[in-house]
Amino acid sequence: MKTVLAQLRRIDVRLVIAALFAITVLHIATVFTAPSLAMSSAWDRLAPALKANTMIVFPPVTPEAQPLPYLAPDARIAMCLFDTRQAPVALTASLPAPGWSLTLYDKNGLAIYTAAGRPDRPTAVSLLLVPDDDRFMGLTPEAQGLRSPRQNQLRVQALRGLAVLRAPDAGFAYRARTDAELNAAACQIQQPKP
C-alpha cells in the first residue's frame, strides 16, 4: 500500500495536464478532418444520378429504395443539383404547411440557406442563385427599368450544390397533393432577356 502511495506522489502533474491537452487537441482535429476523409459524401453519391439545374422528385423512401442512407420514411424529397458557373439559376418552390422545408447545401454538405413552411399561410420561395464573385451576369431587370419578377437574389458562396425540398408524408390520402407541390417546384437556368 505504501508503494502505491509513493508512486502516486511521484506523478508529475504537469505531464498529466500536457497529456490531457494533447488528447483534446487530437480529438478536435479528428472531428474536423473526418468529413473530408469520408469515402464518399452525399454529393459524390447524388451528382451522377441528378441532372444539373433540374428538380427531381424521388419516390417514397423504403428500405430498398433510398437515395441516401438513413433517410426518414416519413418525408418526401425533391432535389436539384444547382450549378451557377455558367449562368444564374432560378429556384421556385411552395412550402404550403409546417414540416415543409427548402435547404441549399454546398458541395461539402454545409447548409447555406433554409426556408421553412409556416402554419398560418403558404410560403412561396423564389430565389435567383448567382455566383458570389465579380463576374458580369448581365443587366438586372431593375437596371433595365423593369420590375424584378423575383423578390430575392441570393448570393451563393458555392458555385455548385444541392437544393433539397422536403415534404412531410401525410399518408396516402394526401399523396397526390404532396406530389403536385413537389412537381411544381422548379430549378432551372435563368434565360437572359432580349
Image (cartoon, rainbow, N blue to C red):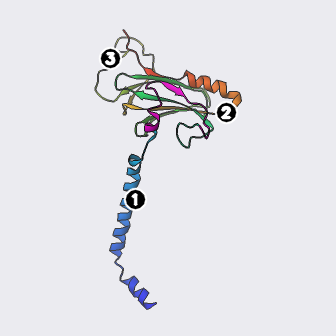
Q: CA distance from mark 3 to mark 2?
A: 43 Å
Q: Secondary structure at mark 2?
A: loop
Examine the structure image and report whether residue 180 is included in the region drawn in magenta. Answer: no
- Image disc number at residue 170: 2
Q: Tell me, yes or no, whether the two marked residues, 2 and 1, touch with CB atoms within 8 Å.
A: no
Examine the structure image and report whether residue 61 is included in the region drawn in magenta. Answer: yes
Report x, y in % for residue 100.
58, 32
Earlier in the chain: of badge 1 and badge 3, it is 1
Earlier in the chain: of badge 3 and badge 2, it is 3
Q: Secondary structure at mark 1?
A: helix
Name the residue rendered at 43%, 43% in the picture: 40
Name the residue rendered at 36%, 70% in the picture: 17
Label 1 or label 3, whichever lies nearer to me, is: 1
Given the current orientation, which residue lies at the most extreme front position?
64
Report x, y in % for residue 31.
41, 53
Give the residue at mark 1: 27
- Image disc number at residue 138: 3
Q: Is residue 47 left or right of residue 172?
A: left
143 in relation to 114, above or below = above
Question: Bounds of the magenta span?
Answer: 43-64
- Identified by mark 3, the residue type is Gly
Location of residue 59 by image quarter: top right
- Identified by mark 1, the residue type is His
Earlier in the chain: of badge 2 and badge 1, it is 1
- Identified by mark 2, the residue type is Ala
Q: CA distance from mark 2 to mark 1?
A: 42 Å
